[in-house]
Image (tube, helix red, strand yellow):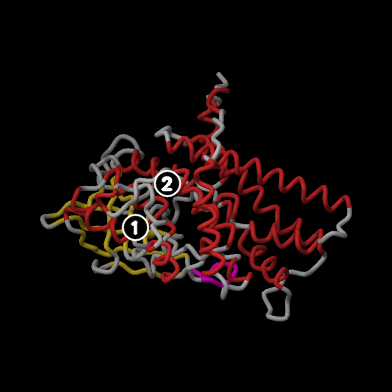
Amino acid sequence: MLNIESLRFPRYEQPASLAPLREEVRAFLDESLKAYSPLVRSNTWDGFDPDFSRKLGAKGWMGMTLPKAYGGHERSALERYVIVEETLAAGAPVGFHWIADRQSGPVIARYGTEAQKQKIIPGITRGEVCFCIGMSEPNSGSDLASVKTRADKVADGWLVNGTKIWTTNAHRADYMIALLRTDSSADSKHRGLSQFLIDLKATKGITARPIKDLAGRGHFNEVSFVDALLPADALLGKEGDGWKQVVAELAFERSGPERYLSCFILLSRLVDALGKDASPAALAKVGAELAWAVTLRNMSLSVAGMLNEGIDPGLQASIVKDLGCQFEQRLPGLAQELVGLEPTLADAGTDFQQVLGNLMLLAPSFSLRGGTLEILRGIIARGLGVR
């Protein structure tokens, strides 16, 4: 039976009290990003700049919702939303801290031991720690529950063997939260999985090999584990609860405004390039895209509001990710159609051409990160009760 109620996005307005924070963030970004070209800014949450991340941490804009006992600030999800939205819209390089702040910190705060929280979370809130995600594997496609990389319990800890892939920034990250199989005898592939907090700098037997993407960047990695010995206290949460924990983690990964703001700099540059003499047809097309953007923002704010109230937004986050991906992947083609300039990364190109060229290369990958559209639509179908 179709469950229409599950489709609801409760309306959340950002309180007027957040306006000073937004203005403060904008002023900070105007000053901090002066030296960044539009091309560099178009990489935004893939942009890797540890110094910038530390500056955000010094402002108190990292780990905003995490407990004060571990260096967090215990501020609302809506306040954190302001920081995320403004940094992405400005094209700030947030890649160094992105995963740690978005999901690893909250996951550790929720499932970690007291020792893990005290050791790791303060570095996250200072913008000093880089995390990567150890989920995807070769030959598993988007079937995350089919992972085969094993963690076998031994006398002095856990012995890990196997391979992870598409692991962003694994070659320069400090830590990985990995989903590993600890029991192959379980009667369901969703059982027998556990999460581990892995110190990539201190653990032998782990090799990260960068994979070049279409844009020539080597931020993806294949990560191999060959008799990598983890200490007993590397287990994150309870043994066997990995699937439950990773589903909760994916809600953080899919719920933010990054799911529609990756190409925002292109939309703003498109408006500038068209100028006041744009044809009615061009204005109509740009207006339709802006309407999409406003709608997605309202939906994304609804997800942030649900998180703020402790409501599980898994279904709504999947819908925002699906629609946001369609929006972002459509923008480069529309921008080229309306302006009539060839995309290029060459120095001779205009700022608009360079931004367009970069996002033309990056946009095809947007449907993969955070779960493929096919997987997301399966989640949506189950949430609606039609699967």
Q: Which mark is residue 317?
A: none
> Label 2 neighbourhood size at 10 Å, few (<14), some (14-19), many (20+)?
some
**x and y percent of residue 73 in the render?**
34, 50
> Label 1 neighbourhood size at 10 Å, few (<14), some (14-19), many (20+)?
many
As rendered, which of 202 and 46 lies closer to the eye? 46
Q: Which mark is residue 125?
A: 1
| Residue range corresponding to the magenta coloring | 211-217
**x and y percent of residue 26 in the render?**
55, 59
Q: Which mark is residue 144?
A: 2
Does the magenta-highlighted stretch encompass residue 212? yes
Placement of 375 over or under 168, stated as above or below: above
Q: Quadrant of the N terminus?
A: top right
| Residue contact at pointers 2 and 1, CB within 8 angstroms | no
- In the picture, residue 7 is in which quadrant? top right
Horizontal side of residue 177 vs 307, given as left or right = left
Does the magenta-highlighted stretch encompass residue 234? no
Residue at the (16%, 56%) spot, across then down: 157
Which residue is situated farthest in the bottom direction here? Answer: 348
